[in-house]
Amino acid sequence: MIKNSEELLSHGFVEGRKKALDIMERALSAVNPLDAVKKYVKLEGNLLFVGEKCFDLENVLNIYAIGAGKATYLQAKALEEILGERITDGFVAVKKGQAGHLTRIRMAESSHPIPDSTSLKAAEEITRLADKAEKGDLVFCLMSGGVSSQAVYPIPGISLQDKIDINRLLVHSGADVTEIMTVRRHLSRIKGGRLAERILPATIVALTVSDEKTDSMEWNTDWTSADSSTLADSVRVLKKYGLWDKTAENVRKYLSTPAPGKETPKVFVDVPIYNLMIVRARELWEAAVKRTEEMGLRPVLLTTLMNGESREVGRTLASIAREVHLSGNPVEPPCVLIAAGETSVRIEGGSDGEGGANQELAAGASLVLLSDDPIAICALDTDGTDGPTPLAGALTDGSTVSSALQKGLDIFRGLMEHSISRVLREVGDAIITGQTGTNVNDLVLLVVLRRDPGLT
């Protein structure tokens, strides 16, 4: 999947870089949504098996498929290959640049990470099909990371621009993804289980690709799971990050005045909703661990709950890698330190530079390394687009800072201005995959070897 491997391996700590890319490729291949749907959904005559559930299609009137998210195209493609003409109608919203070929399920591109009018149009079409479903119908809901931006349907009294503004504030605030979703779902007609209310009493089968650190079903099936958060939680998130006074007055008024009917559904009882996680975030790092072992290296899983300011997380992880190299604590090299989760970038002062969380993490890590450290650091956003950029992440080592200086560029300044993409491109450390068709957590690999067999 990594398209510029030759460039990435043309300089720096080549042996460490080579191992990092090998492991990363294996991890990405382990979270392919098309393969996952075919693993869990099988058709035998008129019997449709979804996980442990069996549906007799003789008793099903119509089959609909609706979805949104960065892994949705491959999910929909797999569903078409399995069900073919049995699908009555369908619609999925994919990230801009992801559109492929589908025959039974209609498709449109919509915006991420900041929603726009295409996101509203997508949500309106998804809602139209949801409202069309009746008892006796089977509705597949295909979800993955990006769904909250790619399908946006504000509640009455809240405009699309209100949603765009608050989404931009949250994305740039450094808030965790679940905190961002807490606010967004309470301003939506479809999130927090509200789409399920529209589909019922039709049968709902939700297939989701996890992009949440703990593989929580609630956060990964936002349309079809009851909501454990409240309006008051939304207010707390906005105040926590200093956004309350920056939020539109009508939004503040709505969130701070509880009333019957304003809360999202808190429980679904005795209804035909079947939520199935077909790709878990843990499968990403599990594949990385397995490949590391196959290569004769020692895997060390540091965390699957990685979070925090990206550049600072990078510096911390690099410090741990240097400790391993210098003292053998807490583990002797050769080894690969593995971290999964999702860091964030807090942008203040109206910076409009180009970058992303994984790029900042890898660049921040490079500031800690010395030129002869046998350490390579690879940080990747698994959907192939780190932040609002066409880059997937970065692969850095002890040569990155000096290479930048030779070109008149400053890694530290690039990080402070949140404009690190240009620097990484110039030094040949930016990773390019294109749209991968999947989306789970971010993955960071720190390859630490005993010696330096390839610094150039």
Image (spheres, rainbow, N blue to C red):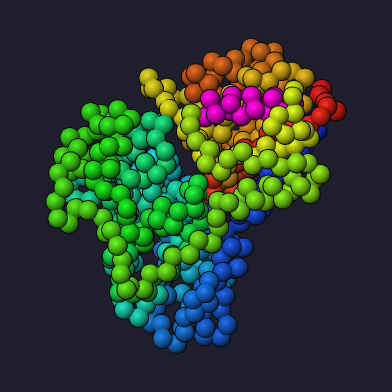
Vertical relation: 186 (above or below) 319: below
Residue at position x 28%, y 42% in the image: 234
Region in magenta? 310-325
Q: Is residue 63 left or right of residue 383?
A: left
Magenta-drawn stretch, dominant element (helix, strand or loop): helix
Q: Which quarter of the figure has residue 427? A: top right
- Furthest toward the bottom, the residue is 58
Q: Choose top left, top right, bottom left or bottom right for residue 324.
A: top right
Q: Position of residue 407 (x, y in %)?
A: 67, 14
Percent position of residue 423, x then y: 60, 22
Front one among 23 and 80: 23
Q: Is residue 428 visible?
A: no
Q: In the image, what residue occupies the spot 53% across and 21% down?
A: 415
Q: Quadrant of residue 235?
A: top left
Residue at 76% in and 33% down: 332
Is 378 left or right of 9, judged from the image as shown? left
In the rendered image, is residue 123 in sight?
A: yes
195 magenta-colored: no
Quadrant including the C terminus: top right
**Residue 318 drawn in magenta:** yes
Q: Pinpoint residue 419: horizontal percent, then vertical percent.
A: 52, 23
Q: Residue at x 54, y 62 (%)?
A: 278
Across and down, in percent, residue 343 comes to 50, 35
